[in-house]
Amino acid sequence: MSANNEELLTQCVQYFKSNQGFKRMFEKIRDKYCSLGHLGGTINLDNLMPAEKEALSGFLCKDYYNKKSASITMESLIKALEKSKFCGVYFEDVLKSYFQNSLISKKEEKNLYISQKEKFFAEIIGRHEGTRAEKWLKSILGSKENAYKLISKHYDENPDILAKNLDFACIGVNRLSFESTNTVRLALFASEISKNPHCFDYDALAGKLLLYSASYFLNKPFPQNSEEKSELLYQAGIINDEISSFTTCSGLIGWKNGKPHPGWQGFYEYSEPMQLSLYNLSGIDYAACSNGKVFVFENPTIFTEVLYSTSHKKPSLICTYGQVKLASLVLLDKLSDHADNIYYSGDFDPEGLAIADKLKQRYGSKLTLWRYRIEDYLKIISEEPIDKIRLAKMDKLASPELKELASAIKIKGFSAYQELLTKFYIEDILNM
């Protein structure tokens, strides 16, 4: 552009900027330009102000003084500029200069966004080339699954914060052992990587990303509650809370280095219940049960009553306290190779069947659903109704025998509680 044209452009932009009557018109033109990617179309101005009426009338040589609104084509604006003293100046140059070159079309904006995002992730992948993290990130970006929505959301909010936390998660997943026999405590693990023991807390961004990476390599769905998260990390080689996750048992002996653990042996000899935390369980190689059988209850009252009535036989009993905590799963894992049968019984309601289904899927044919038949349900059915929302939860059950039981429960629509089966549990154990 020549010096004369630049001067004329400057004067033209000054003319439009100095008159407030053109302000809303230019804003509308900008929005239309960004939407179309070029000058064109029609803009509409409603509720014209006096200054706008005067400005439009003078520039377009058309009477707007008695009009409440204006519909203006881009073509008419370009022709008006050509007929003015600013002839030779392009309207697009005026528009860009008016908004100080900050003009960008929607298409250009989208392409720029995609380009910058690709560069962002390419740099992170490059920092972890040849590692598990590279495989995980490439899978996320290619499939748009796993943590994709989470990282996209945080990229839009603050790319710098995402980059920092994503690097922590990448370093973390590269260091995981993915062996439950080779574990590290979560807070120490986090401190070594980030110098912050809370870096991988479940509600922290890096913590969520680490969980997503673990779920990817373990081929498991993203965990929905703290117990599922603890279990997933345990399988990946991390222990989160060794003390508050506990289980209670009786009639079991833990073995370490080929010898029975003296603490476990003492409780066994006295037929007393023993409370075990993850810390206690980490100190044994495996656990052994009496006669190859272990009986699992979710209800502590029933566990206590059965123990009281059968302690002279020293049966192997476990109490999970409702929803199966990680400690109970770890104990059952350490038992499963040394037990012939794991007997489980729970309540006849959606929540009870969900627990039974989880254990059945985990331990397969080794786990027997004990006193968990339709006839057992009908024998003790209560008058406590189950609402439709809870009943629908049973549609997700995978075990065929539990599906049959669920169908019966749906027909009746009432819960049944295992307390009324206590005497049968005792009889079964004594007879076995």
Image: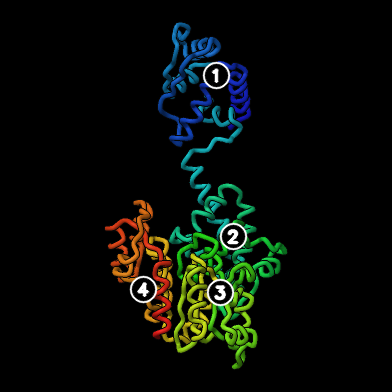
Q: Is residue 104 above or below residue 159?
A: above
Please give the name of the residue rendered at 60% of the width and 52% of the height, measured from the top-left corner: 159
- Give yes or no for contact between labels 1 and 2 (Cβ–Cβ under 8 Å): no
| Residue underneath mark 1 | 22
Q: Amino acid at mark 2?
A: Tyr
Measured in 3D between alpha carbons, the distance from the residue under mark 1 to the one under mark 3, in whole angstroms, is 79 Å
Name which residue lies at 47% across and 65% down: 139
Q: CA distance from mark 3 to mark 2?
A: 26 Å
Q: Residue at x 56, y 21 (%)?
A: 23
Label 4: which secondary element: loop
Q: Which numbered marker is on residue 202?
A: 2
Label annotation for residue 102:
none
- Marks 1 and 2 sit apart, C-alpha to C-alpha, by 54 Å
Would you call the spot at circle 1 few (<14 residues within 10 Å), some (14-19), or many (20 or more)?
some
Residue corresponding to mark 4: 371
Q: Is residue 266 above or below residue 45?
A: below
Q: Which residue is mark 3?
A: 248
Give me the C-alpha separation between circle 4 and circle 1. 83 Å
Helix, strand or loop under label 2: loop
Amino acid, disc 4: Arg
Give the percent coordinates (x, y) of residue 113: 52, 48
Q: Nearer the viewer, mark 4 or mark 1?
A: 4
Of the two numbered discs 3 and 2 in the rendering, the one whose residue sits closer to the viewer? 3
